[in-house]
Image (spheres, rainbow, N blue to C red):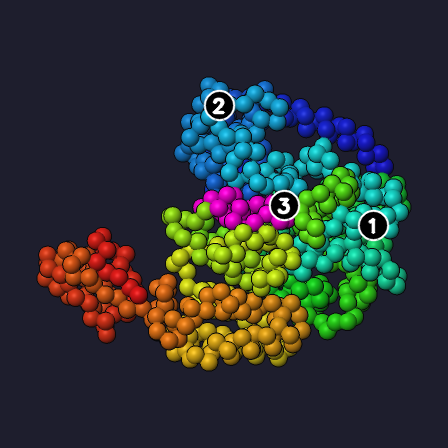
Amino acid sequence: MNNLNEIRAKYTEQFQQKSKRARIVVGLGTCGIAAGGDKVMEAIKQEVAARNLDIDIDFTSCIGMCYREPIVEVALPGMASVIYGDIFPDKVSQLIESHVVNKQPVTEWAAMQIPEGRTEYDGIVTMDKSAYYEKQVRTVTSRLGRTNPESIEDYIATGGYEAIEKALSMDRLAVIDEVKKSGLRGRGGAGFSTGMKWTFVYNAQGDKKYAVCNADEGDPGAFMDRSVLEGDPHGVIEGMMIGGYAIGADEGYIYCRAEYPLAIRRLNLAIAKAEKLGLLGENILGSGFNFRIRIKAGAGAFVCGEETALLNSIEGQRGMPRVRPPFPANKGLWQKPTTLNNVETYANVPFILRKGADWYAGMGTEKSKGSKVFCLTGKINNTGLAEVPMGITLREVIFNIAGGIQDGKQFKAVQSGGPSGGCLPAEKLDLPIDYESLGAVGAIMGSGGLVVMDENTCMVDVARFFLNFTQNESCGKCIPCREGTKRMLEILTRICDGEGKVEDMDTLERLANVIKTASLCGLGQTCPNPILTTLRYFRHEYEAHIIDKRCPAGVCNALLVYKIIAENCTGCGACRRVCPVGAISGENKQPHTLDTAACIKCGGCVSKCKFDAIIRG
C-alpha cells in the first residue's frame, strides 16, 4: 500500500460518520476492566438489545481518571458527549433510560462533558474546565479514552502514520536534527537527549542496527507505559519506525513485561494490522525502507529496566547489566549499534514530526521541554494518569489535578521517580517539575511516578519499604549494590524495631554515598535516594525512633504503646471482646485497663472503639 492518502481519506470519512451517530463507549483499559468495565459493557449490550435501540457500542482505553472507573461515555448527535464515572451494571438501565431515551444526562453521575463544537449541557463541567484536566496537556495521551485502541482506522483518521510518511521524505539526519531541536529527553529516567542518542547510533559503524523500546515498567504504582501501550499502540510503533529510519535500523524490539497481557495483545494486533496495510515490513510506503517489530515478554525483573540488562534478556541471557563502555549505541543488541528509548519517548516522536520541533519546544522549561506523563498514586483523592507541561509545580499536580489529600489530612511528602526516587517535604511543594529542579533537591524524574504520603506516614518505614524492594530486585552482580543494600536494610529494620543507634544515621549516609558512586548500573546508583532524602528532610523522625524510641506516625509496631484514656472510656466492652489475647479487662460501664505487657499491638481495639478512648503512640 503505497498511497496512504487514499486510505486516510477513507478512514477519516468513516471516523467522522461514526462520531455523528449515537454511541456508548466503555473504558476497557486494565483499570477499567479491573473495576468491572467488562461487566458494564455486557450490561449495556443487553439493555440496548432489549430496548431495540439504534446506537453504536464501542470501547476505548483509560482516559486517565482511574479513580472514576468504570467510565462510560454517551454521545448523541449534535450534543456534547458526556463522560460518566463509577458506572456499574446496576446503573446501566437508568443511564440509558435518562440519557439515551429521554435525552437527559444524569448530571450527578457525570464527570465532565466534551463539546467538540457541539451543543453543551447545563450543569456539567467541560473537560478543559474540570479540576482534573484544566492544567493538563494531552499529547502522548491525546488518543487515550478518545479512540478505539484496536482500530488502525481510528489511528489513521486522527493523524496516525502521517509522521512516518513525512520522515521518509526527509534525510535521516534531518529527522534526527528535528528531534534534537525539539529538546525531547528520554522519558524513562535519566533524561538524556533523544536526538543525541540517535546521533551516536547513526554514526556508529555496523552492518545491522536495532531500535529497542523499553516497556519494562517495574516501579511500584507506575502504569504510564502500560496505559500508553493499551491506549495508543500504533503511536509507539510509529515512533519506533521513525527512530529506526533515522538511525538506519531495519528491526525493532519492544521489551514489555509479561504482567501486561492486554498491552502485549494490543501491540501484537497493531503490528499485524500495520503489516497488512504495508506500513510495517518491506518497502514501507514505496520508500525502500524496511522495518519489522518483534515483542519480547519480560519475566518481571526490575533490573531489566536498565538498558544493558534488558538487552541481555532479549538475547536469552540472565538480565544483568553490562560494564560500560562500550555503550549500546556502539555495541548493543547482539553487539550491534542500538538505540533504546522508553514507551513515552517514542510516543512523543510522531507529534514532533507532525507538528514541528518548535511546537514541542514551546512547552516546558528552558532545559526540560515538552510534557510529561505521571502516575498519581498514594494518599490522594484522584488517583490516575496525568500529562502535564514540564515546569508545573508539585503543588499544582497534587492539590489541583490529584484533588488533594484523602480524608482532609495533612500532606507530608511526595516521592518522585519510583523506588529510586527522593522523598520531598511540604516546603518543596512549589518546586517546578523538571529534570534539573528535581535533581537539585535529591529526587529524580524517573519514569514518572508520584507517590503522595499523608501525616500518618512514617518516613523511616517508607525508606525501609523502598529499599527492601530494590534490595530484592538487585541482580547481585556488583558488590556495592548486592552487599550495601543489604547492610542499609538491616540498619533501617533495626531502627524501626527500636534498636537503632545515633551513629546509624551517619553510617546510612556513608553507605548510601558509596553505593551511589560505586554501583555498576542505575539500580544501585539511585536506590539510596529514599534514604538520603528522608535523612535530609525528615531527620527528626529518625531521631525520634532512635533516641525517644517512638514512631511519631504510629506506624512502626515495635515502638507503639497502646493506652486507654480512662475519662473517655465508657466501659462498653467492645475493645475487650475483640482483643485476641485478653490484654484488656474491666467491668461493664466502668473504665477498662490495658496490660501493655500482654498487648500484641494488633490495633483491633483502636478500630472498634467509638469514643477515642484508646490511643497508640
Q: Classify residue 256 by image quadrant.
A: bottom right
> In the drawing, what numbered circle is on residue 432?
none
Q: Classify residue 557 by image quadrant.
A: bottom left
Q: How many marks?
A: 3
At mark 3, the secondary structure is strand
Q: Could you say where residue 597 lies in the image, as x and y percent from the top left? A: 23, 74
In the rendered view, would you say 120 is above or below 407? above
Q: Could you say where residue 276 lies in the image, as x and y percent from the top left? A: 77, 41
Marked residue nearer the N-terminal end (3 or 1): 1
The answer to whether residue 257 shows anywhere in this view is: no
Residue wearing tag 1: 177
Residue at left offset 54%, top offset 71%: 471
On-image quarter of the N terminus: top right
The answer to whether residue 514 shows anywhere in this view is: yes
Q: What's under tag 2, amino acid-wise?
A: Asp
Residue wearing tag 3: 389
Residue wearing tag 2: 122
Q: What's under tag 1, amino acid-wise?
A: Asp
Marks 1 and 2, Cα distance to the nearest angstrom? 48 Å
- What's the magenta region? 381-403
Q: What's under tag 3, amino acid-wise?
A: Pro
Q: Could you say where residue 235 lies in the image, as x and y percent from the top left? A: 70, 44
The reply to whether the magenta stretch includes residue 401 is: yes
Crowding around mark 3 (Cα neighbors within 10 Å: few <14, some 14 to 19, many 20+) is many
On-image quarter of the C terminus: bottom left
Asked whether 473 or 171 is in front, the reply is 171
Crowding around mark 1 (Cα neighbors within 10 Å: few <14, some 14 to 19, many 20+) is some
Marked residue nearer the N-terminal end (1 or 2): 2
